[in-house]
Amino acid sequence: MLEAGESTVVAKETPFDELKRYVGFDPSDAVQLRSLADPLRPHLPAIVDEFYMRLVQHAPALDVLKQSGSTAHALQQSLLHWVQDLFHGVYEEEYARRCMAIGRVHVSIQLPEHFMIMGMSVLRTAILERIQTLDLPAARAKMSAVNKLLDMELTLMLEAYHRGASELIRASERTGLEARLAESEHLANVGQLAATLAHEIKNPLAGISGAIQVIGHSLPPGNPHKEVIGEVLSEIDRLDATARDLLIYARPKPPVRKRLQIGRLLQQLLMHLRQEPAVQGLRIRCDGLECAAEARIDEMQFRQVMTNLFLNAAHACEEAGEVTFRLSSTDAIVRIEVIDTGCGMPPEMVEKAFEPFHTTKAKGTGLGLSICQWIVESHGGKIAMESRQGQGTTVTIELASEQ
């Protein structure tokens, strides 16, 4: 009887205790399991052999175990120790921890959980058949105890399996996030460096260009140095374009959008692009530019996108081939396609086409398509590329249409 001021201390129920209560596992079951240790001991190696005979007949499970690097003998010994452990008679927290460890091992070797369930079913059947064959006293109580224990074993293994699988997924996601953050930080640093370099380059270039033009104008007609002056100015223009691309990539401006008729804009752009040296000798087709489709776009940014795509197509065709501008629309989407019959690209190059600083050209920053992608996506649109080596390339842009 408790004295005044005294209180009882109730032990907190552990998850394993709760599981035992749920399946009805009590001390009498532990007694029945202990009584099976000696009668079943001679039969356990045969039960394990039977299990592995079934295993080797199931190719997917066998492949998983082979890939884990474990030998058949080592696996059989581990399973034999586990089966022997079933009948040692002490079923407390340490026993539960050993069960959980088995589930984690199955995660580490990437064994699908349904193999665990099937394997437990095979072992359960083999053990119960041996108990029936031995004609032991209280056989029904013994088989009931085995069923309860194996139910708890499977529950603990599956719980550990799911925990381990979740931990692996979280670790993988964390690693991926850290990699993306590192890449973003690296690109931000590169972008800042690019912006600084571009800014420092553009002003001197303008001065150099002006000085070279003055020198060129001072030369009399027919002077052989005029051609050299022209080449220098051409290279200055190329450097200026590179600096401009770096600035756009490093410090992109949000689009200032207004409602425009896409077909009319493309027709105006093509009139200008036909004068480009890279276009001379190419066949240029227009399909559907009379379409009245409209979209809300930043005109200057959109012109830059289409100029980049058109010149890429022209360079891919070199001095022969065909470039097609195709415009189509539905109630929801305006679709623009730039199609060339040029050299095309293998799949591994197509996958990297929109990555910054990736280029197949001898001259170029590799930023053109990255900038195109940023502009299109900042308009809420999509850009995609399809290409076949030796057959040509198609770049497709989809924008929301304006009704």
Image: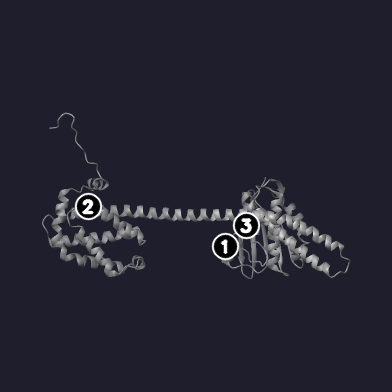
State how far apart marks 3 and 1 are (Cα).
Answer: 12 Å
Residue farthest to the right? 220
Q: Quadrant of the C terminus?
A: top right
Q: Nearer the viewer, residue 123 or 350?
A: 350
Crowd tier of the residue under label 2, counting other residues whose Cα lies within 10 Å: few below 14, some 14–19, many 20 or above: some
Q: Nearer the viewer, residue 49 or 71?
A: 71
The x, y position of residue 39, in whole percent, is 13, 62
**Sequence-earlier tag: 3 or 1:** 1
Determine whether label 2 and label 1 are within 8 Å by CB. Answer: no
Question: Looking at numbered disc 2 in the image, what kind of residue is underneath it?
Answer: Lys
The x, y position of residue 234, in whole percent, is 76, 63
State the image quarter where residue 72 is shown.
Answer: bottom left
The x, y position of residue 217, in whole percent, is 86, 62
Regarding residue 31, the answer to whether it shows in the image is yes
Question: Looking at numbered disc 1 in the image, what kind of residue is underneath it?
Answer: Glu
Circle nearer the viewer, 2 or 1: 1
Left or right placement of residue 330 versus residue 138 in this view: right
The circle drawn on residue 148 is 2
State how far apart marks 2 and 1 are (Cα).
Answer: 54 Å
Look at 59% across and 64% down and name the residue there: 350
Determine whether label 3 and label 1 are within 8 Å by CB. Answer: no
Left or right placement of residue 167 versus residue 232 in this view: left
Q: Secondary structure at mark 1?
A: helix
Q: Nearer the viewer, residue 327 or 226?
A: 226
The circle drawn on residue 351 is 1
State how far apart marks 2 and 3 are (Cα).
Answer: 62 Å
The x, y position of residue 312, in whole percent, is 68, 63
Q: Secondary structure at mark 2?
A: helix
The circle drawn on residue 266 is none
The circle drawn on residue 370 is 3
